[in-house]
Image (spheres, rainbow, N blue to C red):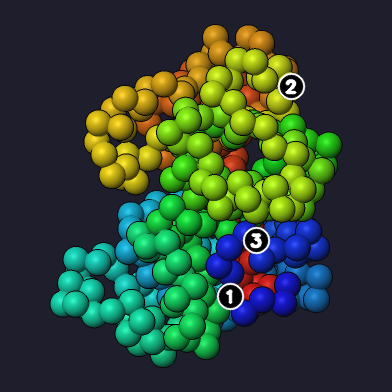
Amino acid sequence: MQHDHVLTAKQFSRADIETVLDRAAALDVRAREASSSEPGRNRSDDGARVGDRHAETLLGLLFFEPSTRTRMSFETAIKRLGGDVVDMGSVESSSVKKGETLADTVRVIEGYADALVLRHPSQGAAKMASEYVDVPVINAGDGAGHHPTQTLLDLYTIRERAGLDDLTIGIMGDLKYGRTVHSLAQALTRFDATQHFVSPESLALPPDVRYDLDEAGASVRSHTDLETILPELDMLYVTRIQRERFPDENEYRAIADAYGIGLETLERAKDDLSIMHPLPRVDEVDPAIDDTDHAAYFEQAHSGIPVRMALLDLLL
């Protein structure tokens, strides 16, 4: 991993991805062993306790949009590595409400932290912020743009469940505004994966993302209906219809309930089909699926800890 910042999934080579996932797997195993053994067992390959690896390291959290999993998993990850966080807090309680620019905000917090995790509603915000600071900037979601660390934990879950090569995956829902979809689709081009995209025409992949996939030689198919390709899938990645991204409320209401799955949907699926979701969900995945072997979305969310631990460990 020779990167100054983590801004998009496009910057990752296959080797980068495998390096992060391998490190995450090792950290995950050691953390599980330590939780059920005597103190001192939670050690890395070089003999240092995982909890001591980044003592005194401070991670700056700058979240201009709401977050549960991303914010808390980054905070948990750095604390499990021995560090801590400095948190900008809510936008309403910060100097942003006084008119402070993003450039000024990141330059100030750069003086307090060793790396910055930024979520912002404007696409390209993380890249812009990275041009003003010398510490690493990690994009935790920039509008409808990218979410590269979500992609890494998605890939970790896929690798655990089905492997990343010889993979057939369906990605369904809001493909236009879904930044998790954009990042995952681009990262999957590094592997032998066939991607089926399922959405209404109004929420199809943006042209620039589809262009990147075509340029990478990805095997890509587009559909408006899940039923025809469901029996082929090893994984199904479902996303919510993102109301907050829609410029037109009427457009949202027209399609909000059109793409969802329940137990009856899975009758034609493979027995070992795994269903993923970046969460939060609304009603696109029936809670009745939660107790089946198909459900991988809570496992997926929990993977955020070892994956973000590994990324921070390598980046710092």
The numbered mark, 1 or 3, whose residue comes first in the sequence reads 1
Q: Quadrant of residue 46?
A: bottom right
Relative placement, left or right, of 300 versus 169 is left
**Picture coordinates of residue 220, whole percent (x, y):** 70, 37
Crowd class of label 3 (few under 14; some 14 to 19; many from 20; radius 10 Å): some
Which residue is identified by label 3? 10
Indicate the amino acid at tag 3. Lys
* Image vertical order of residue 27 relative to residue 173, above or below: below
Q: Are marks 1 and 3 in contact (CB under 8 Å)?
A: no
Q: Is residue 42 left or right of residue 203?
A: right
Q: Secondary structure at mark 3?
A: helix
Task: Name which of mark 2 and mark 1 comes first in the sequence.
Answer: 1
Picture quarter with the C terminus? bottom right
Question: What percent of the width, then of the height, locates residue 30?
Answer: 72, 58
Secondary structure found at label 1: loop
Of residues 10 and 203, the one nearer the viewer is 203
Q: Are marks 2 and 3 in contact (CB under 8 Å)?
A: no
Residue 128 visible in the picture = yes
Q: Is residue 117 above or below residue 204?
A: below
Residue linked to disc 2: 232
Q: Disc 2 on helix, strand or loop? A: helix
Q: Which mark is residue 5?
A: 1
Please state which amino acid type lies under the numbered disc 1: His
Report how far apart the C-alphas of labels 2 and 1 lie in the structure. 37 Å
**Residue 281: x, y in percent?**
42, 34
